[in-house]
Image: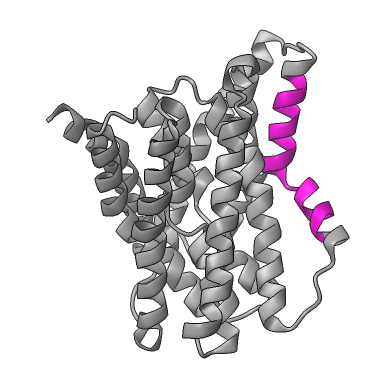
């Protein structure tokens, strides 16, 4: 019962905040334009403060684990490779292949992985989880650009991709946190309080906006690819990679960080990238985000409960 309640406390509050966002959209309090504007503010201001703060207040000597970082990166590359190869064989529509592949390997680590980690660790020892974000987010971005360009017939420009990654606010804030730690730079107390308070807004705001993004219906001709992505993303991938992580000996906050990478739904930014790049079926990309996010409320609960009972954290 204790493990059941812990798992519920990690997932149910997220669901309720998302439900509030959906209700606000349904009531006309927010429209689609508002969602994207607020999401940009969260991406450029609130989330960077949260990531910076998590690293800034951590002890890097205890949270840097090259073995964990290598496992996370290798896992992402493995899932990407399987999706990239497999989608050519079972998705006949060329304009959907990049969208489906991205939906399988790209996780909503920042928006849903961090809240789960905060709930399961009590908000402590998040340094190792945040460092994983600094590694995985750039990797997700690079692979997403590659796969979308590849299936729309475009040519990948590595220099431009690297420059875009380096300009990513999440990457910049993570690197700044590491730099402050390495150089032992401390902010004045007033600035620490401000950064910490701004960062606290990030998680509930992003979950609220994710709920507002939900739009059900009108996906009859897209049910098959959405169902396949959802099954692989939320059940097959975490089942295989989290089991491998357990066998590899990862425990505690490190294992929780891997749950954030491999068991969370498809990233909201995957839809935005498809839209901005004109790289495929935009409606399918949005459906994948909505359905994987909705189903993840139940799948995340099951994975957390299972691995908690197995003593992984």
Question: Farthest residue toward the front?
Answer: 247
The C terminus, quarter of image: top left
Seen from the viewer's position, the closer of residues 248 and 291 is 248
Verify whether residue 167 appears in magenta.
yes
Residue name at image x 43 percent, y 56 percent: 265
Seen from the viewer's position, the closer of residues 136 and 38 is 136
Residue name at image x 49 percent, y 65 percent: 104
Q: Does residue 38 show up?
A: no
Seen from the viewer's position, the closer of residues 64 and 212 is 64
Prevailing secondary structure class for the magenta stretch in the rendered image: helix
| Residue 211 position in % (x across, y down) | 39, 56
Whether 282 is drawn above or below 220: the answer is above
Whether 97 is drawn above or below 195: the answer is below
Whether 42 is drawn above or below 198: the answer is below
| Residue 24 position in % (x across, y down) | 37, 56
Side of 274 where 12 appears, left or right: left
Q: Which residues are magenta?
A: 161-180
């Amino acid at each position: 019962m204790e493990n059941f309640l812990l798992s519920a406390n990690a997932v149910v509050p997220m669901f309720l905040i998302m439900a509030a966002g959906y209700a606000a959209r349904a009531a006309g309090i927010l429209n689609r334009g508002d969602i994207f504007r607020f999401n940009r503010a969260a991406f450029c201001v609130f989330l960077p403060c949260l990531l910076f703060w998590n690293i800034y207040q951590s002890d890097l000597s205890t949270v840097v684990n090259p073995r964990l970082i290598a496992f996370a990166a290798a896992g992402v590359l493995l899932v990407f490779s399987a999706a990239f190869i497999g989608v050519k064989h079972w998705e006949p529509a060329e304009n959907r292949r990049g969208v489906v592949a991205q939906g399988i390997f790209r996780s909503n680590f920042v928006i849903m992985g961090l809240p789960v980690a905060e709930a399961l660790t009590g908000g402590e020892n998040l340094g190792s989880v945040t460092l994983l974000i600094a590694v995985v987010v750039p990797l997700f971005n690079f692979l997403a650009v590659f796969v979308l360009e590849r299936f729309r017939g475009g040519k990948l420009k590595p220099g431009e991709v690297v420059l875009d990654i380096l300009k990513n606010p999440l990457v910049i804030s993570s690197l700044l946190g590491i730099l402050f730690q390495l150089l032992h730079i401390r902010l004045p107390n007033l600035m620490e309080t401000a950064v910490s308070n701004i960062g606290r807004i990030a998680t509930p705001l992003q979950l609220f906006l994710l709920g507002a993004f939900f739009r059900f219906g009108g996906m009859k001709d897209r049910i098959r690819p959405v169902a396949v992505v959802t099954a692989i993303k939320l059940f097959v991938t975490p089942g295989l990679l989290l089991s491998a992580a357990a066998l590899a000996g990862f425990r505690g906050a490190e294992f929780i960080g891997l749950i954030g990478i491999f068991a969370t739904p498809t990233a909201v930014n995957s839809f935005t990238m498809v839209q901005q790049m004109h790289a495929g079926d935009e409606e399918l990309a949005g459906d994948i985000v909505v359905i994987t996010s909705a189903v993840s409320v139940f799948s995340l609960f099951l994975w957390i409960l299972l691995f908690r009972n197995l003593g992984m954290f």
